[in-house]
Image (tube, rainbow, N blue to C red):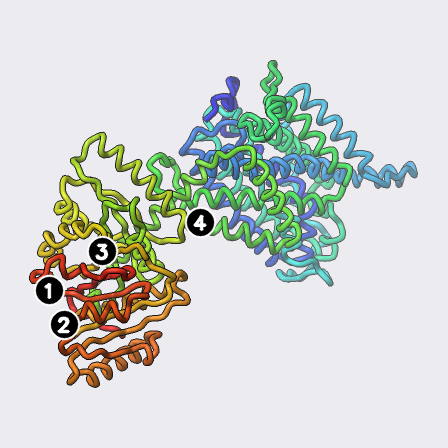
């Protein structure tokens, strides 16, 4: 966190934050467009606009308060908060759009200031015959005067003027509410509107900038003595006070003038107030105070962006950092902001500028609410705000911001997002720093994973075999010699199952072996990233394979439940690797795991075309698991052109009965196996291995069954002797699995 964002002369308290925010909230929109809004959508419609707007601004104010009480908020306000939470890249993309909205706001309020001269323009025309056709004759000189004063005097002038204009604004509002016009309608109709009124969301777009005052208060963060205290208190109180006044103002407009008068006279408040001239004076004061607030905030946002070296041209970043040594003002950033404001002052259309501001602010508010929402679920120990918002309020604010953007103006919404996306892409090309965003989302994913695992574990109340799926774990010390076991596991876990692959390191746990395990883990991740897989990777350090197997079989699965299947593998050229399976078979059997042993050959898995399943009379418990595994493997895209063939080896007197059982099983289990691919072989006086090799020499994968008695009787011979065949998967089921 750069210390150069901290101002040495920061001396503002909470009240300037409140005044800056409230004078923006109760500013030009209230005086110029709020009566027009009541005329177009009626009292009920305006209440809807106020509520909808504050469903965004209140969650944002609470989110700002939360984030501000967690970290030291330095110069840059909302930009600083976003960039330190989402990372500099996406923070800068949002921050630049926020800065543009702040700079454009200066023009908006200067244009509104010129509108306050309507009565004076009319008086001059009536008395002297001199008519000012273009109000830019007022707004442009005003902008020039304001710029000169600000560049020479800085924020201190702005704050002194803010106290004065806030007082005038308060008097104007009091006289407005005390007024009782003779032209008030006799019958109050709460949903009365003019003929052919503007749409609800168009009116909302024009009105929404009135509710964005909290961003103005945030911009003073670098000039505050205690931002953690001043920002929450100032922004929340300004938002609440603004909400109350707007609700009363909506009612006052409704009972004081007809919809036609409200929509046609932008200074209708003059006819309602006790003393009419106070309204244009109040409008001028509110506009100037808001313009001063924006012209104080915008340069500080741009300066903070420069201090973070966001722009690819370091000369530009250095230029934007420059401050006036006398008053600590961001002099060059102020010049840029004033130039942008002048451009929009020349445009001179209040409604057009209001739409641009609304769109940019909506993006910013949505981002702030989303940060707060994600921080709730990331559960980062470093996130310890003293003020806590509610996650559902932050989520509501984020969703409404995005939804309303497209409701207001889809073209502007898409354009705003494209601009922000373009800025992000440009910054991303020159700066790869994304730690904030990655850290935040990683925390969310970790917490979501934890919740899902706990849910899955608690939901496992019945017998898991009633709806069997493979929760498989594989342990191997030959991960970098052969990939067949990993491939088999990724096929099993692609859609229907869960797979964990563990590389075994022989030795005792110490600093050296721990470091080696981390290096091995990185190698595994790099190798796995070259294939589409959903396998969880890990390593284990143990003095023997026996102890490693015992540890592995006690692990909890990543699915939130325990494992039910263990996979071993050995090369046909090195059958000695089988010994650790044979030696530990009683241990494996005692855990009630289904056991799979993969025998890999130089042929590998061939062309992924044929899976041969060999079922014998001794495979009563294994048969269903063998068929189901073949079906699960075939579900992977690598086997999309593959077929399953079943070979049943039975005595001649059982062949018809067993074939019928197999066909019923395939049909009732909805397995994609053609009856023509089910072949029965007479096992009388035949060598089973020879029969298998004769029929499955070219198979890409064979699945054979075995049981405990065969292991004790034959040992390693049971799994060897299949020369020149492809890979073979030996399967032993703990108990028969139902195929439904």
Q: Earlier in the sequence, mark 1 or mark 2?
A: 2
Q: Earlier in the sequence, mark 1 or mark 3?
A: 3
Residue in the foreground of this view, choosing between 658 and 249: 658
Mark 2 packing: few (<14 Cα in 10 Å), some, or many (20+)?
some
Q: Which disc number belongs to residue 618?
A: 2
**Of labels 1 and 3, the one closer to you:** 1
Say if mark 1 contacts mark 2, CB within 8 Å. yes
| Residue identifier under label 4 | 393
Label 1: state its secondary structure. Answer: helix
Residue in the foreground of this view, choosing between 27 and 651: 651
Mark 1 packing: few (<14 Cα in 10 Å), some, or many (20+)?
few
Say if mark 2 contacts mark 4, CB within 8 Å. no
Mark 3 packing: few (<14 Cα in 10 Å), some, or many (20+)?
many
Q: Position of residue 609 (x, y in %)?
A: 37, 66
| Residue identifier under label 3 | 567
| Residue identifier under label 1 | 710
Q: Can see residue 23?
A: no
């Amino acid at each position: 966190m750069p210390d150069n964002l901290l101002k040495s002369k920061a001396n503002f308290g909470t009240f300037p934050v409140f005044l800056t925010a409230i004078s923006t909230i109760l500013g030009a929109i209230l005086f110029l467009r709020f009566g027009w809004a009541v005329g177009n959508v009626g009292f009920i419609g305006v209440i809807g606009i106020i509520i909808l707007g504050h469903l965004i601004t209140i969650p944002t104010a609470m989110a700002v308060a939360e984030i501000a009480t967690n970290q030291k908020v330095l110069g840059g306000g909302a930009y600083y908060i976003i960039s330190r939470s989402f990372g500099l890249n996406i923070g800068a993309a949002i921050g630049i759009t926020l800065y543009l909205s702040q700079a454009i706001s200066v023009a908006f309020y200067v244009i509104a200031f010129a509108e306050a001269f309507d009565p004076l323009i009319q008086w001059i025309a009536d008395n002297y015959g001199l008519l000012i056709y273009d109000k830019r004759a007022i707004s442009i000189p005003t902008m020039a005067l304001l710029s000169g004063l600000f560049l020479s005097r800085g924020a201190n002038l702005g704050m002194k003027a803010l106290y004065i204009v806030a007082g005038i604004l308060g008097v104007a509002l009091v006289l407005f509410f005390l007024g009782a016009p003779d032209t008030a309608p006799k019958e109050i109709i709460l949903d009365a509107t003019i003929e052919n009124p503007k749409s609800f969301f168009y009116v909302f777009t024009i009105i929404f900038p009135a509710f964005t005052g909290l961003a103005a208060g945030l911009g003073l963060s670098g000039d505050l003595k205690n931002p953690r205290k001043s920002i929450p208190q100032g922004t929340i109180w300004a938002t609440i006070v603004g909400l109350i006044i707007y609700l009363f103002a909506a009612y006052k407009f409704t009972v004081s003038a007809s919809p036609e008068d409200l929509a046609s006279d932008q200074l209708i408040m003059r006819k309602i107030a006790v003393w009419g001239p106070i309204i244009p004076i109040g409008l001028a004061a509110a506009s100037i105070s808001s313009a001063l607030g924006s012209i104080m905030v915008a340069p500080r946002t741009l300066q903070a962006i420069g201090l973070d070296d966001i722009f690819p041209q370091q000369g530009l970043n250095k230029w934007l950092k420059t401050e006036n040594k006398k008053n600590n003002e961001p002099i060059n950033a102020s010049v840029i902001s004033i130039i942008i404001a002048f451009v929009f002052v020349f445009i001179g259309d209040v409604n057009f500028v209001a739409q641009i501001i609304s769109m940019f602010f909506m993006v910013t508010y949505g981002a702030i609410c989303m940060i707060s929402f994600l921080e709730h679920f990331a559960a980062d120990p470093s996130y310890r705000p003293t003020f806590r918002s509610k996650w559902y309020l932050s989520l509501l604010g984020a969703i409404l911001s995005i939804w309303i953007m497209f409701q207001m103006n889809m073209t502007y919404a898409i354009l705003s997002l494209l601009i922000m996306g373009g800025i992000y892409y440009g910054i991303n090309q020159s700066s790869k720093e994304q730690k904030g965003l990655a850290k935040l989302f990683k925390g969310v994913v970790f917490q979501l994973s934890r919740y899902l695992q706990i849910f899955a574990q608690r939901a496992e109340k019945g017998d898991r075999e009633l709806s069997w799926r493979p929760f498989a774990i594989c342990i191997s010390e030959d991960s970098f010699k052969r990939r067949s076991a990993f491939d088999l596991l990724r096929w099993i876990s692609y859609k229907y199952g869960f797979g964990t692959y563990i590389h075994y390191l022989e030795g005792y746990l110490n600093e050296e072996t721990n470091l080696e395990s981390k290096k091995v883990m990185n190698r595994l991740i790099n190798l796995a990233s070259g294939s589409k897989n959903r396998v969880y990777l890990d390593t284990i350090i143990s003095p023997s394979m026996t102890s490693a197997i015992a540890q592995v079989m006690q692990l909890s699965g990543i699915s939130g439940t325990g494992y039910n299947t263990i996979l071993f593998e050995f090369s046909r050229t090195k059958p000695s690797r089988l010994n650790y399976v044979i030696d530990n078979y009683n241990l494996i059997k005692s855990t009630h795991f289904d056991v799979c042993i993969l025998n890999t050959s130089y042929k590998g898995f061939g062309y992924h075309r044929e899976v041969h399943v060999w079922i014998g009379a001794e495979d009563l418990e294994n048969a269903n698991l063998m068929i189901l595994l073949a079906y699960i493997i075939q579900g992977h895209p690598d086997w999309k052109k593959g077929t399953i063939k079943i070979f049943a080896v039975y005595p001649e007197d059982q062949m018809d009965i067993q074939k019928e059982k197999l066909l019923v099983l395939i049909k009732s289990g909805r397995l994609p196996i053609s009856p023509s691919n089910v072949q029965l072989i007479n096992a009388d006086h035949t060598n089973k291995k020879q029969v298998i090799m004769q029929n499955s020499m070219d198979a890409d994968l064979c699945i054979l069954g075995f049981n405990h008695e065969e292991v004790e009787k034959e040992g390693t011979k049971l799994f060897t002797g299949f020369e020149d065949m492809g890979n073979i998967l030996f399967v032993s089921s703990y108990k028969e699995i139902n195929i439904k």
